[in-house]
Image: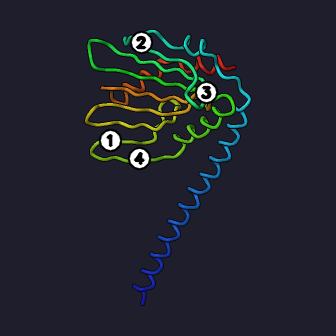
């Protein structure tokens, strides 16, 4: 009878632990949704950076890699301002593609709030092809995906709760990719937006 009672108590403890975790996750989701609403309101009336400001922000060189292409303007049907650039060298196969969307304005604010939630939920998954996880590097929380066989890294994050950044690094591991991100001077975007 004692063994039966211990077994029942153990099962009840396990179910209680699972219930607590689900309540915690639900509470976190509610908190993140509330924060997202606040961000939308803050950015809705903000003035987006101009194409000239975004283009002027792009460096010609990034850690020895030359800018080989760029595009600035509105993103398709979303009508939000953005900038894209590709960096590379002829010497090796490394290439970096940077995409930044300004989350200011009515549509951009909704995109920024959703994008910003990417880094707020801790997750990790791995298989033979890729390793995807939420990481925080020097204060930036991002969703990081590393493709093992091709040695490619993708980072997605919201910078300063406004700028939606996607980095695609080819033939680069995550550490090397993050080093380049920190050389982009993203803080300059925030200062221009003030």
Q: Position of residue 160 (x, y in %)?
A: 60, 29
Q: Position of residue 152 (x, y in %)?
A: 33, 31
The numbered disc on residue 1 is none
User: Could you tell me how far apart the alpha carbons at marks 1 and 3 are, in whole angstroms?
Assistant: 31 Å
Residue at 34% from the left image edge and 46% from the top image edge: 126
Tell which circle, 4 or 1, labels the residue nearer the N-terminal end.
4
- Please name which of the two marks, 4 or 1, marks the residue nearer to the observer: 1
Q: Are marks 4 and 1 in contact (CB under 8 Å)?
A: no
- Mark 2 Cα-neighbour bin, 10 Å: few <14, some 14–19, many ≥20: some
What colour scheme was applied to this rendering of the protein? rainbow
Provide the residue designation for mark 3: 80
How many angstroms separate mark 2 from mark 4 (CA)?
33 Å
Nearest the camera: 47 or 65?
47
Q: Position of residue 49 (x, y in %)?
A: 64, 19
Residue at screen point 44% across, 27% down: 167
Tag 3 or tag 1, which sits nearer the N-term? Answer: 3
Mark 4 vs 3, N-terminal side? 3
Q: In this rendering, is residue 183 above or below 125?
A: above
Q: Which residue is found at the position 32% from the left and 41% from the top?
A: 130
The residue where tag 2 is placed is 67
Which label lies toward us, 4 or 3?
Answer: 3
């Amino acid at each position: 009878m004692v063994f039966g009672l211990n077994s029942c108590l153990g099962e009840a403890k396990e179910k209680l632990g699972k219930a607590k975790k689900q309540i915690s996750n639900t509470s976190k989701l509610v908190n993140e949704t509330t924060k997202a609403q606040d961000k939308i309101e803050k950015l809705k009336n903000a003035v987006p950076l101009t194409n000239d400001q975004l283009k002027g922000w792009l460096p010609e060189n990034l850690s020895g890699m030359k800018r080989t292409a760029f595009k600035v303007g509105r993103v398709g049907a979303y009508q939000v301002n953005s900038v894209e650039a590709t960096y590379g060298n002829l010497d090796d196969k490394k290439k970096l593609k940077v995409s930044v969307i300004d989350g200011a304005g009515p549509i951009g604010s909704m995109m920024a709030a959703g994008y910003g939630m990417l880094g707020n939920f801790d997750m990790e998954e791995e298989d033979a092809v890729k390793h995807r996880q939420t990481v925080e590097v020097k204060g930036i929380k991002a969703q990081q995906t590393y493709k093992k066989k091709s040695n490619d890294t993708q980072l997605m994050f919201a910078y300063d709760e406004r700028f939606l950044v996607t980095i695609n690094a080819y033939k680069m591991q995550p550490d090397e990719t993050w080093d380049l991100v920190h050389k982009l001077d993203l803080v300059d975007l925030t200062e221009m937006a003030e």
